[in-house]
Amino acid sequence: MVLGPESIRGIEFYSGIGGLRVALTRSSVGGNATIVRAFDWDQIACAVYTANHGPGIAHRVDINTLDADVLEPLNADLWLLSPACQPYTVLNPNSKGASDPRAQSFLYLIEGVLPALAERGAAPTRLLVENVAGFEASTTRTRVLCVLKKLGFVTQEFLLTPLQFGIPNSRLRYYLLASRIAGAFVSHVDLDRILRHIPGHGADRKDGRSSAFPEMGENQVQPLRDYLDKDAQTAPAVSDRVLLKWGRLFDIVLPSATRTCCFTRGYTQMVERTGSILQENEELDTTETFDKFLLAQACGDERAAEILHPLRLRYFSPGELLRLFCFDGVGSSSHFRWPDGISTKTKYRLIGNSVNVLVVSALIEQLCKGG
């Protein structure tokens, strides 16, 4: 792999808890890279970012207020962006795409600020955008690609999941790489096609939203047990109240499993499509146990939920999610720091809004190849 030797100065937009920064630092270009500024509107996210990466970098700001006068002095040649996904998610039938107010700041950056910087000769030479699967079908994407092409960027797009990188989590995400460096993305692939793998790293993968989705062989994905806390008491149990009302809707996985559903900001607050829960007892058959529970519930047994207790169902802890998102190493204690007073609910929200560090790190290396 040939990576650019020059020093890289990066800006994070929608920086959250710093996943994009961690990915840059851990990539092959990390030794030559510096994040000079990180912008986010969420005050708690900025506090968490500062606790982990030091003061003076994360700034709480409305991104709609940024302009070329603010950004030009930062002299950044790399933009890392993870804008709001709610306008594009396929899980929301009422998603509004580019007309959603939450999409406006991103469009403002790309259609307003970026061309203004280009006119001054101060535009970044590389960009990376992360968003939810579904963004690829949006008018926002069409508008963004149009601006980038006019400004001389070559682009490469991906739909990737951590399963392709050996991580037992099916968080399918859209990624856009853009570069103005001569010779960027030199390969035999069609740059107008959305890729399902990074060139030179495996083969195309099936869509993670379909039922048949064998990204990797079972023996190539690490089992969940490698990501679990040594002290399981750090994770909250699923309450009887939730089990009685919603238990049949959970995606339940075992420690030996090699897949979990996508964890979102609503984990533990909503049931469907917000992430898997763990069954610690692998000796009991999940389906048989739930059949007994449902029968007892249908017969009006007020103690029906107790039938599920031997399964030992629980949520994944924030620390376990940090490992699945590759902030922390497998089998290690957490080095991630949470400021005092951050609730568990808020931790889940911030992690669910973040990125998979390993996947983004590989994409940053792809973005910086040959330039």
Image (spheres, rainbow, N blue to C red):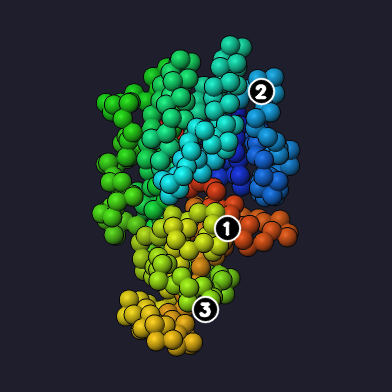
Label 1, label 2: how far apart the Cα atoms are: 32 Å
Mark nearer the N terminus (3 vs 1): 3
Q: Is residue 348 above or below residue 286?
A: above
x%, y% of residue 123?
57, 19
Q: Secondary structure at mark 1?
A: helix
Residue beneath the point at 67% across and 40% down? 41
- In this picture, residue 210 sits left or right of residue 311: left
x%, y% of residue 229?
52, 68
Label 3, label 1: how far apart the Cα atoms are: 21 Å
| Circle 2 residues within 10 Å: few <14, some 14–19, many ≥20 | some
x%, y% of residue 269?
55, 62
| Circle 3 residue | 240
Q: Is residue 307 above or below residue 145?
A: below
In which quadrant will I find the N terminus?
Answer: top left
- In this picture, residue 325 sits left or right of residue 56: left
| Circle 2 residue | 67
What amino acid does circle 1 point to? Answer: Tyr
Mark nearer the N terminus (1 vs 2): 2
| Circle 1 residue | 348
x%, y% of residue 303?
48, 87
